Amino acid sequence: MTGRLGIADISPSISCGTYPARAVVGEQLPISATVFREGHDKVGCNVVWTPPREAGGRRDRPPNVPLVPGAPGTDRWHATVVPDREGTWTFVVEAWSDPLATWRHAVAVKTEVGQSAQELANDLATGAGLLDQAARLVPKAWRDRVKAAAATLRDQDLDLQHRLSPVFEPELHELLLAHPVRELLTKSRRHEVWVDRERALFGSWYEFFPRSEGPVVDGRATHGTFKDAAERLPAIQDMAFDVVYLPPIHPIGEVNRKGPNNTLTTEAHDVGSPWAIGSRHGGHDAVHPDLGTIEDFDAFVARTRELGMEVALDFALQTAPDHPWVASDPEWFTTHPDGTIAYAENPPKKYQDIYPVNFDNSPEGIYAESLRVLTYWIEHGVKIFRVDNPHTKPLDFWHWLIWRVKQDHPEVLFLAEAFTRPAMMKMLAKVGFTQSYTYFTWRTGKQELEQYGRELVATADYMRPNFFVNTPDILHESLQYGGPPMFKIRAVLASMMSPTWGVYSGYELFEHVPVRTGSEEYLDSEKYQLRPRDWEGARRERRTLAPYLTRLNWIRRQHPALQNLRSLRFHAVDNDTITAFSKQDGEDTVIVVCALDSRTTQVGTLALNLPAIGMDWHDRFAVQDLITGDTYHWGPFNYVELDPHHEPAHILVVRRYPS
């Protein structure tokens, strides 16, 4: 805005303030603005940072956080605030004309060119008057000192240097900066920041199908239960994952049920796709009878919590043809001219076992039912929902539903599974989604990885990424043909670049066979059949990546630098198959150097942008590899050599030399 003073380009501001910016408890949130005025007088500015109301309507008195000037000549001002609770925070940028700073600058310039006390008589009188005003603003313990400085300015028996010296003392100068005389006060509009709990930004996810955890009897897989799945939880905890994500756990449709590898023909023992929700056994508020009862689910959630993790549950607004909604509310679906209900299609893909919901036919009904279903699962301990294909539903629906849920349950988080166009992906984040799946899975080259990383940093005020290395739907060709070293490479990139990352079960066993050449679908996909795994045999024979994933997750937990997105910075390497980046949080600095080629040893020279990590260009320092324990002595230019069959990456913590 432009008032008496100019305030422009306030950040964070999402779509000109239409949507709240995002932060989490304890996050360092940068606030900036362009502040200016006519002429040459000095300006000052601050942020009024207001917390949510406490229970009962009480609100703490908001602090005024000073903004400090950025690069000379830019008129850009910056501050950092740290929210300490969940809810809606607000901030206002205040700008003012700073007469004391203007006076100090003018007097300093005039004395430098030799002007006398007589020539500066008006300036000295003006300064004394400003100090009189300042004395009413500073803490009581300092008032006499400020008044004494004003009296000294007026004392004509002293020479000019002694009259000026008190007001130029560093201690008094800092006091007056903290308690400024403000003229022509101008305020911006109020901006909102929604603050989530920490898990909204930082966490490690593990996806698995409880139904695949049943015992193998006479060579045949049997359907697992929640009790079977609970036996898998300690191993997931051992790998230091925070979130256990379950695909839909509801009854699966029997009409048009899919067979193995997405075939249209089934046999009696075929289990179908969990995303074909609903049957004679119930719908979105029921559990599949082969998994157990709702009490068994409650016990699974409780066991997960006992182990220091939490459950994320799939929320897929679609139905099987025999879902109870189809009979009770047929208007929620799209009907063909011949009277049949349209099943889901994404040409050339067909989903004969799924009916999509039409949100325009009866919005009141489906809105209310969606809220009821979410509330039901929240009451059963679910605080995170992974939302299936949100980009195929109306944006205004999500905006209403998410914020309606957060009115009563601010701790609930929503992950958007939306591999869609950038505009839609970003808008889903703006309207309320806590996190988003990303294009990371398909970014494998150096240039595209680094460009995408910078793009995500630029949207960090509202869009938080979740880097899954694989999903039941996505087995990228780099994993199909890159061998075990590529599994390490992708895990390092995902876990170190993004504060939230995830793996789908089987990644640690290097599962890599597609259903056919050119496809990203797994052979014998777990989406359509049971897929038991020999975890103990893999551990015993040391053909598992689990120890490596464990190490990565512990490094993430121990280093705050890896728990944020905003500090991600890339550094130059003269080899297009090596990428390097750093992240920082206070004194904690982590540098990652990772090969992108899983076949051959790569060498190069790393040119670190040392000022970007808080050092001078010619500083020397030690770095310790958090994977191998090796220590190196580095400077601005460093030789690196990465053998993917030994260790494809350095994860280095900076150890500064004593000054």
Image (cartoon, rainbow, N blue to C red):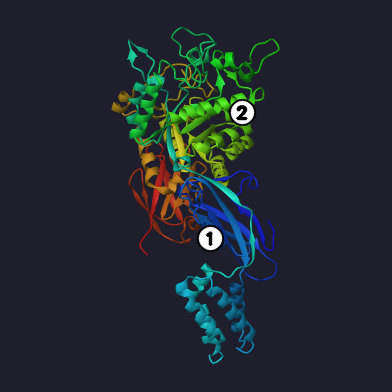
Relative to 560, is 366 above or below?
A: above
The quarter of the picture where the N terminus appears is bottom right
* Residue 393 marker: 2
Callout 2 amino acid: Lys
Instruction: Give the labeled residue for mark 1.
Output: 64
**Name of the residue lying farthest toward the top:** 268
Callout 1 amino acid: Asn
Dot 1 falls on a residue whose secondary structure is: strand
Residue at 58%, 81% (x, y): give it: 128
Q: CA distance from mark 1 to mark 2?
A: 42 Å
Residue 387: percent from left, percent from top? 53, 29
Relative to 261, is 409 above or below?
A: below
* Residue 553 marker: none
Residue 379: percent from left, percent from top? 44, 30
> Toward which corner of the image does residue 599 lie, by quadrant?
top left
The quarter of the picture where the C terminus appears is bottom left
Of 451 and 56, the residue lying toward us: 56
- Say whether residue 591 is visible: no
- Say whether residue 113 is visible: yes
Are there few (<14), some (14-19), or many (20+) residues within 10 Å of tag 1?
some
Residue at 30%, 25% (x, y): give it: 536
Are there few (<14), some (14-19), or many (20+) residues within 10 Å of tag 2?
some
Task: Decide if residue 357 is on the left or right side of residue 239.
Answer: right
Marks 1 and 2, the one that precedes in the sequence? 1
